[in-house]
């Protein structure tokens, strides 16, 4: 893994001359932030050694360097998912590369289903404060390389208290409504059953989706400060009265995308 990540890092560094300290991963339909970048350099995933490509509608497959509010960032337009057939290490590979590139702050975004009707509804933006891993395994299983991180990483604070406070302060400044809550990571690709949603609800989750958790595990392992936003695009099975549609997920995410882009732009300028 280390030599593969190093090869990717060395290739990426030939494409721009900056030194960004923040990386942002975009979820389905959450692409408005790409329009906010200046001095853009786009790198196709297929050209980066050992990178995979995204196969999901609403995701492109390119890494973008640019400036957001004058601050250098790296943007992942298109993430990888376990349900695409990738291993946990393959889908989190970019996070390992970010570490070698000198990234210190990671902002994750996703589109997901709401569970806690007292807290979220379609269109809500949730600042994730903890996670429940319901995926079959995690990306740290296997031999550990101490050059990346410890064998048994701590998950007391998977989402940085400092970054969450900055996010809340900026939301107040911009008058953006939000909630905080727990996100459950489900493997997919089918939408969960009513029984599964009831189980997840009883576990204490406020929302459920098919990403973010593996990346959070790795980012904490690597010592990156992590912030995550979940855009509620629909209510989960048994709560929503209609059948699920990925097209509708992308549509709802697009509607919330500009608001989230403005919010992240202000956060990045602070960190």
Image: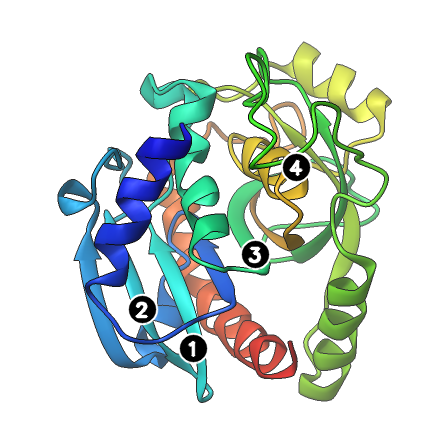
Which numbered tag is attached to residue 87? none
Mark 3 or mark 1: whose residue is earlier in sequence: 1
**Callout 2: 10 Å neighbours few (<14), some, many (20+)?**
many
Closer to the observer: label 4 or label 3? 4
Residue annotated with mark 1:
72
Which residue is painted at 54% across and 68% down in the image?
260
- Percent x, y of residue 200: 75, 21
- Percent x, y of residue 91: 41, 30
Looking at the image, residue 240 sits to the left or right of residue 253; the answer is right
Mark 4 or mark 3: whose residue is earlier in sequence: 3
Residue annotated with mark 3:
106
Depicted 23 relative to depicted 91: above or below = below
- CA gap between label 4 and label 1 equals 24 Å
- Please report contact status of discs 2 and 4: CB closer than 8 Å, yes or no: no
- CA gap between label 3 and label 1 equals 13 Å
- Please report contact status of discs 1 and 2: CB closer than 8 Å, yes or no: yes
Choose between 90 and 222: the one closer to the eye.
Answer: 222
Quadrant in the picture for residue 14: bottom left
Residue annotated with mark 4:
221
Element class at badge 2? strand
Looking at the image, residue 66 sits to the left or right of residue 60; the answer is right
Looking at the image, residue 29 sits to the left or right of residue 15; the answer is right
Residue annotated with mark 2:
65
């Amino acid at each position: 893994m280390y030599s593969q990540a190093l090869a990717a890092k060395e290739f990426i560094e030939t494409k721009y001359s900056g030194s960004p300290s923040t990386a942002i991963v975009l979820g389905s339909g959450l692409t408005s932030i790409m329009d906010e970048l200046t001095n853009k350099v786009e790198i196709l995933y297929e050209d980066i050694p050992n990178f995979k490509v995204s196969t999901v509608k609403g995701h492109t497959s390119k890494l973008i360097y640019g400036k957001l509010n004058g601050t250098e960032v790296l943007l992942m337009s298109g993430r990888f998912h376990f349900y695409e057939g990738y291993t946990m290490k393959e889908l989190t590979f970019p996070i390992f590369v970010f570490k070698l590139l000198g990234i210190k702050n990671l902002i994750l975004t996703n589109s997901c289903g709401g569970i806690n009707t007292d807290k979220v509804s379609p269109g809500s933006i949730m600042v994730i404060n903890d996670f429940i891993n319901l995926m079959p395994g995690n990306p740290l299983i296997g031999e550990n390389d101490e050059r990346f991180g410890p064998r048994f990483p701590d998950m007391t604070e998977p989402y940085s208290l400092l970054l969450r406070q900055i996010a809340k302060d900026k939301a107040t400044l911009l008058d953006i409504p939000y909630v905080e809550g727990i996100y459950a990571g489900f493997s997919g690709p089918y939408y969960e059953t009513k029984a599964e949603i009831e189980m997840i609800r009883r576990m204490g989750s406020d929302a459920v989706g098919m990403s973010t958790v593996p990346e959070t595990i790795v980012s904490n392992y690597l010592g990156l400060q992590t912030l995550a936003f979940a855009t509620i695009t629909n209510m989960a099975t048994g709560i929503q009265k209609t059948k699920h549609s990925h097209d509708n997920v992308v549509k709802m995410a697009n509607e919330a995308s500009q608001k989230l882009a403005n919010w992240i732009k202000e956060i990045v300028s602070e960190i």
